[in-house]
Amino acid sequence: MKVLVVGGGGREHAVCAALCKSPRVSELHAAPGNGGISSIAQIHDVSATDICGMVKLAEQIKADYVFVTPDDPLIMGMVDALEAKGFKTFGPSKNAALIEGSKAFAKAFMEQHNIPTARHKTFSCADDALNYIESENVFPVVIKYDGPALGKGVVVAADLAQAKAAVNSMLVDKKFGDSIIVVEECLSGPEVTVLAFTDGKTVKPMPSSTDHKRAFDHDEGPNTGGMGVISPSPFYTPEMADCVMRDIIKPTIEGLRAVGRKFKGCLYFGLMLTDEGPKVIEYNCRFGDPETQTVLPLLETDLLDIMEAVHEERLHELDIVFKDSCAACVVMASGGYPGAYEVGFPISGLDEDFGVSTTVYHAGTKLENATQSATGGSPAVTGGGRVLGITAIGDSLPCAIKAAYQAVGKISFKNSHYRKDIGEKALLCVKH
């Protein structure tokens, strides 16, 4: 089969790598792809948000399946457009993707279906939001932009001054565009992500994971799209998994179907394991990044088989198997990320022998011209904020984390930045 993967980040590289393992994939295409994806798939210069262009590309290559990976095209309705032209597609429809497209909708949905989440209120007026925050006078407080913002639309304000800055940035300066915000209590506890395959009726969770969203060690600095992940999370016990399935995952899938928003694809559950029990921080309508780079390498079942079972609503017939191993992913980012950063720096060390248990996923990379390759240098240069995701698999979390950092030590580019403490809290949990 000919498969087209939409997107060009580290998550898409991991999806392409998983699809490469399928003996049934005869041709693999990606748009727009990146420097790493180009080594395993034919890449096409079509933007991930160009719906018309992507439909034309699918027609041109006669795609049998299209895997729409990023949030923006899903929220915009790319799956609907492709399905209307007869293409089998992995990913939710536009009306189901609203679960991520609007945090206000997601909060109202959770209230309606008694799904545990943080106390919250929604605002479109900055003065009203600030009056509420001042009257509550509880800090830290979380301010969330309603729509997608590349992982940067959430601010945890430690005091009133930070809260005012966040509210004014989103509602007065319109940093992310016209919209509304959600102000909610700051939950505390271990944070866990659970990705789940679903065909709208059956749901099959993947191994749990824990992302590290803050830019710097010890969870300091601004939120990013994610600086590293470990899987499985030692905080997510079998008893906790049963509770989450009963109180959160099943009610979400059944609730979406009940309100006419049947969800087919991968649904992301961002959870906080509080003293009062697990609560939903957020939903995403797709694979997370860099969670995908950590969880998919553990998948043993053919990803194309899963895509077909989801599309044909027969996921209940399929046994999905993951390795009984641990994985860790460390993100190497451009200096300055998630703020301003420079690109175009050559990346060295990518041709090192990292061993069979370690994979380097390209995120923000592009290929330099052939001249550089001819001189013996790496043809890949930095092209984004998060540049690479280095994933290692091990028999234990300490082994996986150690192997990932050993590989990171072999790679370099100007102004590179990465956290040195990925999995540190998890290791402390294991020891105690």
Image (cartoon, helix red, strand yellow):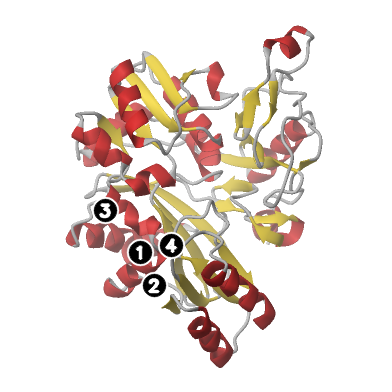
| The N terminus - image quarter | top left
**Residue type at numbered disc 2:** Pro
Estimate the spatial distance between the alpha carbons at disc 4 and disc 1, rounded to whole Å: 14 Å
Mark 2 and mark 1 residues within 8 Å of each other at the beta carbon: yes
**Label 2 CA crowd tier, 10 Å (few <14, some 14–19, many 20+):** some
Q: Residue at x 32, y 40 (%)?
A: 78
**Label 3 CA crowd tier, 10 Å (few <14, some 14–19, many 20+):** some
Estimate the spatial distance between the alpha carbons at disc 2 and disc 1, rounded to whole Å: 7 Å
Residue identifier under label 3: 95
Q: Secondary structure at mark 1?
A: helix
Q: Is residue 380 toward the left or the right of residue 58 in the image? A: right
Q: Is residue 45 toward the left or the right of residue 101 in the image? A: right
**Residue type at numbered disc 3:** Asn
Q: Secondary structure at mark 3?
A: helix
| The C terminus - image quarter | bottom right
Question: Residue at the top extreme?
Answer: 374
Does residue 255 lie above or below 413 as drawn?
A: below
Residue identifier under label 2: 116
